[in-house]
């Protein structure tokens, strides 16, 4: 029963990665982050609607602890960010000076992702070497399969 459950979860995780892919955040894709002042009393749904319409991309809006909003929009360049800032100011009734806009470039995220993949590869090689030395081959293969199984499920959860 548990082998079947494990196989089902693993297949679901693989399908999730293959179909949906990993949803990389703004740190990896690049884009703009707009932060509103604490005095603005705007709902997250209203801000999401306005930001999505203004940018043409799905906006992620989070309410901050101080009462402000953090609006993230991926794949936005400098010119588009200024347009979006003006639209947010007009539509939400917030002065443009009270909206902070920060641009995030995708190159930094790409470098970090490449280093993460390289680190994972080096880790896997070192684990295989250790398992080959420490255990007999049958136990080493079982441990390696368990490791791949766990990594697959973890990545699948994030997909």
Image (cartoon, helix red, strand yellow):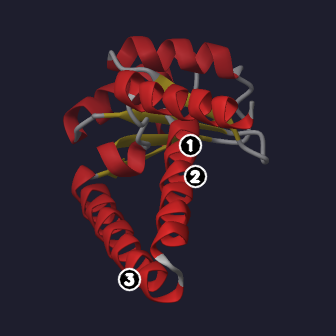
Q: How many marks?
A: 3
Q: Can residue 70 be seen in this view?
A: yes
Q: Is residue 102 visible?
A: no
Q: Horizontal placement of 113 versus 14: left or right?
A: left
- Residue placed most toward the observer, 113 or 64: 113
Q: Looking at the image, is mark 3 or mark 2 nearer the viewer?
A: 3
- Residue placed most toward the observer, 58 or 69: 58
Q: Residue at x 57, y 33 (%)?
A: 7
1 and 2 marks in contact (CB < 8 Å): yes
Image quadrant in which you'd find residue 46:
top right
Residue 150 is marked as 2
Q: Looking at the image, is mark 1 or mark 3 nearer the viewer?
A: 3
Q: In this view, does 132 lie above or below 85?
A: below
Q: In this view, does 138 lie above or below 10?
A: below
Mark 3 burial class by Cα count in 10 Å: few <14, some 14-19, many 20+: few
Q: Residue at x 44, y 43 (%)?
A: 25
1 and 3 marks in contact (CB < 8 Å): no
Residue 153 is marked as 1
Mark 2 burial class by Cα count in 10 Å: few <14, some 14-19, many 20+: some
Mark 1 burial class by Cα count in 10 Å: few <14, some 14-19, many 20+: many
Q: Residue at x 39, y 70 (%)?
A: 124
Q: In this view, does 128 lie above or below 108?
A: below
Q: Which residue is drawn at 32% across and 57% down?
A: 109
Q: Tell me residue 84's x, y (percent).
A: 36, 26
Residue labelled with disc 3: 129
Local secondary structure at mark 1: helix
Question: Whole-Å distance between the Cαs marked 3 and 2?
Answer: 19 Å
């Amino acid at each position: 029963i548990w082998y079947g459950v494990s196989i089902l979860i693993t297949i679901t995780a693989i399908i999730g990665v293959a179909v949906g892919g990993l949803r990389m955040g703004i740190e990896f894709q690049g884009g703009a982050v707009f932060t509103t002042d604490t005095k603005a009393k705007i709902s997250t749904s209203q801000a999401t609607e306005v930001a999505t319409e203004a940018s043409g991309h799905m906006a992620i809006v989070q309410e901050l602890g101080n009462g402000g909003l953090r609006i993230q929009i991926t794949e936005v360049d400098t010119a588009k960010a200024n347009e979006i800032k003006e639209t947010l100011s007009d539509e939400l009734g917030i002065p443009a000076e009270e909206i902070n806009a920060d641009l995030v470039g995708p190159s930094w995220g790409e470098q970090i992702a490449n280093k993460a993949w390289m680190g994972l590869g080096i880790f896997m090689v070192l684990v295989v070497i250790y398992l080959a030395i420490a255990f007999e081959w049958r136990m080493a293969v079982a441990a390696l399969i368990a490791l791949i199984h766990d990594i697959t499920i973890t990545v699948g959860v994030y997909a």
